[in-house]
């Protein structure tokens, strides 16, 4: 798929056909995330793949925004393995994890896997439920599956602010 087509046709899929993702599709999505750039190439991302009925049932206790997806990937960052900006001590790892998640989401679209980026989850409950160590911080949940035949984007999907409202040159 052409890149422009991927970014134009991608939407947050919230209705899936129930079929579990093929391992080959999971592998392709994970490889795309693995290729994402990270601060100083520290690669602080940690990805929890939830692809069993049991893990999806546990996930449902952590968020109402699971959309009955048969597969999900929780993208986290290891705060102990982050590049640190020397001026203000900001960590690059949360941004790195978001870049990884974006690569994964776009690869999913490219291979016909529907995906919805979810940030509406209880991170403490997620950590407790899936035994995530304290230094690993959940950032984004990607609910995934093959789109249902009647899946479609929400109306807001195609509404954009005028670029003049969001882009500035030289100064604000």
Image: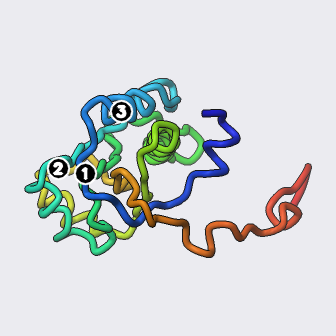
What's the mark number on residue 92? Answer: none
Eyeballing the image, is 124 above or below 155? above
Compared across the picture, whether 112 is left or right of 126 comes to right
Q: Quadrant of the N terminus?
A: top right
Compared across the picture, whether 151 is left or right of 45 comes to right
Residue 126: image x %, image y %? 21, 61
Give the label, 2 or 1, closer to the camera.
1
Give the label, 3 or 1, closer to the camera.
1
Q: Earlier in the sequence, mark 2 or mark 1?
A: 1
Q: Earlier in the sequence, mark 3 or mark 2?
A: 3
Is mark 3 in CB contact (under 8 Å) with mark 2? Answer: no
Q: Which residue is mark 3?
A: 30
Badge 3, how many Cα within 10 Å: few under 14, some, many 20+? many
Spot the residue most to the right. 170
Residue 99: image x %, image y %? 51, 41
Q: Which residue is mark 1?
A: 19
Spot the residue most to the front. 149
Q: Which residue is mark 2?
A: 132
Eyeballing the image, is 67 above or below 96? below
Badge 2, how many Cα within 10 Å: few under 14, some, many 20+? some
What is the C-alpha distance between the residues marked 3 and 1? 19 Å
For the point 52% across and 29% down, the residue is 37
Question: In this view of the protein, can residue 84 be seen by the observer?
Answer: no
Residue 138: image x %, image y %? 31, 53
């Amino acid at each position: 798929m052409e890149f422009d087509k991927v970014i134009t046709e991608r939407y947050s899929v919230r209705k899936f056909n129930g079929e579990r993702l093929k391992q080959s599709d999971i592998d392709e999505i994970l490889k795309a995330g693995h290729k994402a750039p990270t601060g100083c190439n520290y690669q602080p991302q940690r990805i929890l793949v939830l692809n069993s009925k049991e893990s999806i049932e546990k996930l449902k206790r952590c968020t109402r925004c699971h959309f009955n997806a048969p597969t999900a990937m929780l993208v986290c960052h290891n705060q102990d393995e982050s590049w640190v900006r020397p001026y203000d001590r900001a960590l690059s790892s949360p941004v790195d994890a978001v870049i990884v998640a974006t690569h994964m989401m776009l690869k999913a679209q490219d291979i016909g896997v529907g995906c919805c980026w979810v940030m509406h989850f209880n991170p403490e409950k997620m950590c407790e439920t899936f035994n995530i160590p304290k230094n690993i911080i959940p950032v984004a949940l990607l609910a995934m599956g093959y789109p249902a035949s009647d899946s479609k984007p929400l109306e807001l999907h195609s509404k954009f602010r005028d670029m003049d409202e969001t882009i500035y040159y030289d100064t604000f």
